[in-house]
Image (cartoon, helix red, strand yellow):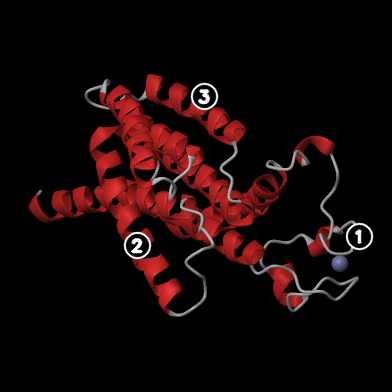
Amino acid sequence: MTTFLTIYFFILGTILGSFYNVVGLRLPNGELFKEERSYCPKCHKTLTWYELIPILSFLFQKGRCRNCKQNISPLYPTMELLSGFTFTLSYYLLGWQLELLLAILLVSVFHMIIVSDIAYMIIPNRLLLFFFVLFLIYRIIDPLTPWWSSIIGGVGGIVLTAAIILASKGGMGGGDMKLFGLLGFVLGWQLLLVTYFLSTLIGAVVSGVLLATGVIQRKNPIPFGPFIVLGASFAFFSGRMIIDWYLQTFF
Ligand SMILES: [Zn+2]
């Protein structure tokens, strides 16, 4: 049963991941609700069902469009694979419990944030607002202990980031501020602080390596959203892993 469900969550993750790619890429430029079917961004040919199978289509077509033979961005299969992996990880770590729903919601919004922020340097307001409503409902059903940790986390995330933006004159933007507010609300103030610590650490290390290897120049800004969601994922899941390890070892 566990094997079946692990495979199930992986496949579900890749299929939804494929959808999240589309949302992340279309939401910022207002194309999401045009009801257009998926098309090749280079030659605009409408894609058929067998060109839309997550990961596999990319592999079978050797990373090229069947029509115009131009390269398909490796961001698509990478994110589909990552989505399959994070869905499986969520199920593996949490099992069947209410918090699995929270984990799925989190990795879903994180996926769309990464795609949008890498492609446009934007974290769409509508995306954050939509998920805020979902998280609000979730936290009414399953509140943090104490419940006001959500309030302190939410307000703290916004105020702290606003202070950083003012002090550093750039580096982080308004989208990052709202994202930290959302994360503080969902995870509570303790995990918000862990997220802050981890995301700035990961951000500093990764941008340091990219600068040193000449992949990016100091003058072009890099999106900070992916580092925030990476830090938040570690905070959310490793907190759980440490608790699990503790319970298994000592009880
Ligand atoms: Zn094409």
**Position above or below: 191 against 188:** below
Question: Of the residues under marks 1 and 2, which one precedes in the sequence?
Answer: 1
**As shown in the figure, which amino acid type bears the numbered disc 1?**
Lys
Number of numbered discs on residues = 3
Residue 129 position (above or below residue 17)? above
Q: Nearer the viewer, residue 113 or 224?
A: 224
Q: Which residue is mark 2?
A: 204
Give how far across and how far down residue 77 sits, in percent: 64, 65
Residue sticking out furthest to the left: 250
Q: Is residue 216 visible?
A: yes
Name the kind of residue labelled 2 in the image.
Ala
**Ligand 1: does it lie within 8 Å of the C-beta at label 1?**
yes
- Of residue 85 and residue 148, the one placed in the foreground of this image is 148
Query: Which mark sits nearer the N-terminus, 1 or 3?
Result: 1
Kind of residue at disc 3: Val
Mark 3: which secondary structure? helix
Whether residue 128 sits left or right of residue 66 in the image: it is left
Residue with the mark numbered 3:
133
Observer-side mark, 3 or 2, equals 2
Name the mark on residue 45: 1
Q: Is residue 83 above or below residue 183?
A: below
Mark seen at residue 64? none
Q: Is residue 155 left or right of residue 47?
A: left
Residue under the image location 89 percent in, 72 percent down? 68
Spatial CA distance of label 1 from label 2 is: 41 Å
